Structures are given as C-alpha cells and as structure tokens.
C-alpha cells in the first residue's frame, strides 16, 4: 500500500545520504549551521561524514571545492538564501571554472521563510546559477524526483543546485494527481483550452486546480526539445514563478517561445521588500489573483 | 629534514627565475610583475627544497591570485613545458595572469581574493595528508572575511600541515598599508587564533632557511603562519618605487634594462 501523505524532502534526502555514507566513505556533508530533525540522527550515525563549518557560507564553498579537489563528494546544505547569493562568488570563481562536483541543497527557496525579512527570501538564485553553465538547477516537485536526482549525483557526481521546498511534498506526484503525466523530468497536465501555465515548486499544487493546461518544470536550467514542442503548441502562455521580475526561468524561456501571441509573466513584485506579508498572501496577491484563486 | 643551502646559489637561481619570468611576459600587454617578484624568492627556496611542485599531490595554493603566474618559470625548469609553449596572457592561452586549472600543477582558479586557505583546508581534510601544504596570501588579502572564516576552521581543526605564508609587502592598490590603514598587520588575526607564527625576510635565504627548518621539523598540533617581509617588485627597482606599478606594464626598454640587469 503506497503512502500518499506528504513528507519533507529535506529529511528524505538526509536519510538517503546517510545510507550512501554507510556504503562509501568519500561523501562529505557540510552544514554551515543549519539543522534538521533528520540531521540530528545523521550526525550521530555518520560523524566522519558530517562537517560543521560554522556560520561561514563563503568558507563552506571554498572548503567544498577543496574536498572535491581531494576526490571527496561534497554535499553542501543550508538555508537557501545564505548558501546561494551570500557566497555566490565562491561558486563562480571555483566551481564555475572547473568540473569539480558539488551538490548544493538550498532549503526553503522563494518566500518559504516568510516570517522573516528580505534577508531570508530567495528570489534571485535561479538567475544566479543559470549564469554558471555547468550547474544543473533542479527543483523537485515530489520526493521520488529529489531522491532520484541524489542517486544520479552520487553515481555520477557533477554540479547540481537543488532547491528543496520547506513544505511537505507528495512521495510521487503521479500517485495523487492522475491527470499528470511525466515527460522527461517535467510533469504535464493537458486541458482542452489553449492556455498553458508553466511553473515549478510547491506553487504548482495551487495551479493544478485551475482549468488550464499546466507544465511543471523541475530542471530549471535546461528546456528539452520535447518540452519546447509542448510550449510552442500553445498560443497563450503564463509563466508563474515565485521569483523577481527578469529572474527565475523567465529569461531562459522567453526567447525560446518567440511565437506565442501572448506571454504573461507572473512574478513577485519587488515591493515585497517593503511589506510584511506571508508567502500565502504574496502568492495570492502577485501570482494567483488573476486566476481567481 | 631540509637540505643545507648555499645562499649565493639561491640568489643566482632567483635572478634566473626573475629573468625567465620577464622573458615570458615580454610580449604581453599586461602582467602583474610586482606581485610576482614579491614572493619569487620564497618560491625559489621552497622549490629548491622540493617542498613544492615536486610531489604527486598539490602542495602550493597561491591565494593571492595576482602572483599565481609566478610558477611558470619553475614549470619550465621542471621540464613540464617549453618556453615557447607559454604564450603568456595571449588570446585563449591557459597561461594567464591568474591561475587556470587547465595547467595540471594548479589546484584552483584565482583572481578574486580570499579563497586559497579554505580550498587548502578542504583538500587536506579530504586527502588526510600530513605533509606540508603552503598557502600564499597577500597582507591586504587578509581583510577578506572568507580568510577569517577559513583561518578559524583551520585553527580549530588543528590542520597543522598547513603553512600559511603572508606576503607582507605592505602594499595594496590604494597605497602602502601603513599609510592607508595605520595599525594594521595580519598578525592581528592569526596570532589571536592561536597560530604558531614566525617572521622572515622574504628576500633573505638564510632567514628563510632558519625559520622553515624550525617550522617544518618541530612537531606541532597548530597551523603555522609565516609573516614574510617583502618588497613588492623586488629585483626590478623601477617597480619597487610605487604602488602605482601594481598593474602597469613596463615598456620594452624598461623590460630590456631589467633583463640585462638580471643577466
């Protein structure tokens, strides 16, 4: 009997990394001071694989590069805003010019930490990492997709930035959303109208209840020909993302769909910097209101 | 145990490497010669002792990226490249001003400052090596916050095989540090973090030999910092004269004269 209850991808990933650490000794899990329930157990079970680098994101990336240089497989884990934009130069200079592997787990992208201020928002990370061609950017929509990417990384280490939602996710989208089908790493729901919504991350679950066709992307750095064919078969496209204008996947996508007669971009208005509103309210106000949601 | 040294021989070798470097950059429109000449004597010493560039694993991390190209003459000396192969800073060349990992002996790209110590820490941690690793930082580079982050980790984890050499030439692009930032010295950071510290004259081989012998042979569980008092542009008097030469390229006449003086 399948478990359909949503669970935390973060904890699933940490458990799986623990399993890998039990069978190989070259995995190094780096945390610049960011915990999790599952991580508490991981630290007990695999002290030799866990490295607490202190509250030092810049050093943590330099250190991860050094580990990779020494043939280890580094996994860097932290709150998304701090392990992305705060130390971006380290990624650019070191990993951006080499092929040394790194799995970056950014927890809580977008407005996940809505009880905080702009310091905790991650609305520009996708554009930053898109500027490094060697990085894959992946935002899993379910547990299986996240774990599958982790498996692939450990089997064949490369450079990956995984955006990990704070919200519990379904184990497998297809089990609970039977109108979805999988195309490559994306999910697609086809409706009869000629409007296509494109999105990624947990906001997809808000969009699934509309009558529009919906394309849920997981790979945010590469659009395959299959996906492009689907996108270009629609006249009206609405890109919905929890990202700032001209950030997110807008720039990646816009020039690939030149024939759409209507291309709308729903984004988080920079005014978010000045108003204390929740993620739910920000989504309603900036992203979903035009769908009457 | 380190080899005994003949200072006169090493002075000659350093003159040779300086000359070789100037010949490599001769046709380039850009080079950062003063930063290179600031540490070239120390590199010569470590190279002579086979402490760097002779091992199967990385042992030299030049964090002060302006001086990364200092190793090119030594790579030629090792027979790894011919002079004609090193098309310094030419279009598409891997032999640029800053480090390029397409050259197998270079562990990390450089350019911006503050990365080397953290990378060296990760490398020594992963490889579990105990032989010395030398990391060169500029005295101005120590201002970078990432240097503090790395320095703290290296100290707390007792990575005692890391030898940090601070190129104390007292110069940044804005001028001489004792004028622009009175009271500053990198020892403010490293001594407070419990590093074992030494001072050397970075152009005096006897001074270097005395300190490196003690630093490397004496057992310690602490990382080591060596403050190397140097002169930026040392060996090229014109470039020693002003911080403004940091990124200026001498004319062909000036290079010819310098090469002649070093011959």
Image (cartoon, rainbow, N blue to C red):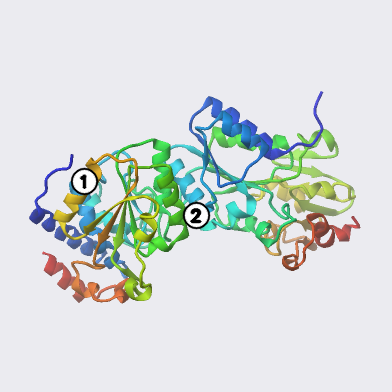
Res A135 visible: yes
Q: Residue at point 68% right, 47% down?
A: A225
> Which structural element holds mark 1?
helix
Are the residues under marks 1 and 2 on the same chain? no
Residue A201: image x %, image y %?
74, 48
Q: Number of numbered discs present?
A: 2
In the displayed structure image, the side of residue A243 where residue B156 appears, left or right: left
Viewer-closest of B67 and A209: B67
| Classed neighbour count for the residue bearing mark 2: other residues with Cα under 10 Å, few (<14), some (14–19), many (≥20) | many
Residue B234: image x %, image y %?
21, 67
Q: Quadrant of residue B254?
A: bottom left
Res B82 visible: no
Residue B18: image x %, image y %?
19, 61
Chain bearing tag 2 is A
| Classed neighbour count for the residue bearing mark 1: other residues with Cα under 10 Å, few (<14), some (14–19), many (≥20) | some
Furthest-top residue in this view: A1
In the displayed structure image, the side of residue A196 where residue B150 appears, left or right: left
In the displayed structure image, the side of residue A42 where residue B92 appears, left or right: left
Instruction: Give the Cα separation between the discs numbered 1 and 2.
Output: 35 Å
The mark found on residue B214 in the picture is 1
Q: Quadrant of residue A235?
A: bottom right
Quadrant including the C terminus of chain B: bottom left
Quadrant including the N terminus of chain B: top left
Q: Residue at point 39% right, 58% down?
A: B189
Q: Residue at point 43% right, 61% down?
A: B112
Viewer-closest of B207 and B260: B207
Quickly name the residue at label 2. A90
Q: Is residue A100 above or below residue B91?
A: above
Chain bearing tag 1 is B
Q: Nearer the viewer, mark 1 or mark 2?
A: 1
Circles 1 and 2, Cβ within 8 Å, touching? The answer is no
Residue A89: image x %, image y %?
51, 58
């Amino acid at each position: 009997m399948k478990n359909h209850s949503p669970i935390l991808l973060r904890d699933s990933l940490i458990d799986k990394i623990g399993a890998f650490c039990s069978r190989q000794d070259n995995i190094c899990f780096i945390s610049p001071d960011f915990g999790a329930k599952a991580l508490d157990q991981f630290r007990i079970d695999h002290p030799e694989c866990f490295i607490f680098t202190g509250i030092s994101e810049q050093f943590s990336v330099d250190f991860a590069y050094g580990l990779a240089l020494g043939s280890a497989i580094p996994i860097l884990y932290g709150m998304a805003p701090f392990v992305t934009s705060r130390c971006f130069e380290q990624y650019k200079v070191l990993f951006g010019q080499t092929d040394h592997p790194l799995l970056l787990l950014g927890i809580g992208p977008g407005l996940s930490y809505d009880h905080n201020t702009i310091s905790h928002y991650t609305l520009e990370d996708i554009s930053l990492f898109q500027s490094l061609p060697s990085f894959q950017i992946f935002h899993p929509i379910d547990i299986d997709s996240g774990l599958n990417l982790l498996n692939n990384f450990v089997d064949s280490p490369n450079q990956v930035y995984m955006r990990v939602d704070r919200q519990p996710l379904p184990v497998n989208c297809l089990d609970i959303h039977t109108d979805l089908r999988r195309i490559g790493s994306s999910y697609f729901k086809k409706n009869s109208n000629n409007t296509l919504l494109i999105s990624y991350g947990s906001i997809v679950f808000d969009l699934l209840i509309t009558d529009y066709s919906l394309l849920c992307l997981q790979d945010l750095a590469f659009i395959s020909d299959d996906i492009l064919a689907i996108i270009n078969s629609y006249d009206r496209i609405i890109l919905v993302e929890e990202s700032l204008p001209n950030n997110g996947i807008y720039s990646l996508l816009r020039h690939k769909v030149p024939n759409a007669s209507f291309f709308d971009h729903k984004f988080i208005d920079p005014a978010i910097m000045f108003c204390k509103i929740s993620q739910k309210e920000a989504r309603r106000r900036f992203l979903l209101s035009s769908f009457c949601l | 145990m380190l080899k005994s040294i003949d200072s006169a021989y090493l002075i000659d070798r350093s003159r040779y490497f300086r000359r070789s470097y100037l010949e490599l950059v001769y046709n380039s429109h850009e080079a950062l010669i003063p930063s290179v000449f600031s540490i070239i004597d120390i590199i010569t010493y470590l190279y002579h002792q086979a402490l760097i560039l002779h091992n199967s694993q990385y042992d030299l991390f030049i964090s002060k990226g302006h001086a990364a190209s200092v190793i090119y003459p030594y790579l030629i000396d090792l027979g790894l490249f011919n002079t004609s192969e090193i098309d310094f800073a030419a279009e598409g060349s891997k032999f640029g001003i800053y480090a390029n990992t397409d050259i197998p002996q270079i562990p990390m790209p450089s350019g911006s400052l503050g990365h080397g110590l953290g990378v060296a820490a990760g490398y020594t941690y992963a490889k579990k090596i105990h032989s010395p690793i030398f990391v060169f930082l500029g005295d101005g580079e120590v201002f970078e916050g990432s240097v503090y982050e790395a320095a703290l980790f290296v100290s707390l984890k007792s990575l005692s095989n890391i030898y940090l050499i601070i190129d104390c030439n007292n110069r940044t692009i804005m001028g001489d540090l004792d004028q622009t930032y009175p009271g500053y010295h990198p020892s403010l950071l490293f001594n407070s973090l419990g590093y074992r510290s030494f001072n050397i004259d970075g152009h005096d081989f006897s001074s270097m030999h005395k300190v490196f012998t003690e630093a490397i042979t004496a057992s310690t569980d602490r990382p080591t910092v060596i403050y190397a008092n140097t002169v930026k542009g040392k060996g090229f008097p014109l470039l020693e004269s002003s911080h403004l030469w940091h990124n200026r390229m001498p004319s062909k006449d000036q290079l010819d004269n310098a090469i002649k003086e070093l011959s």
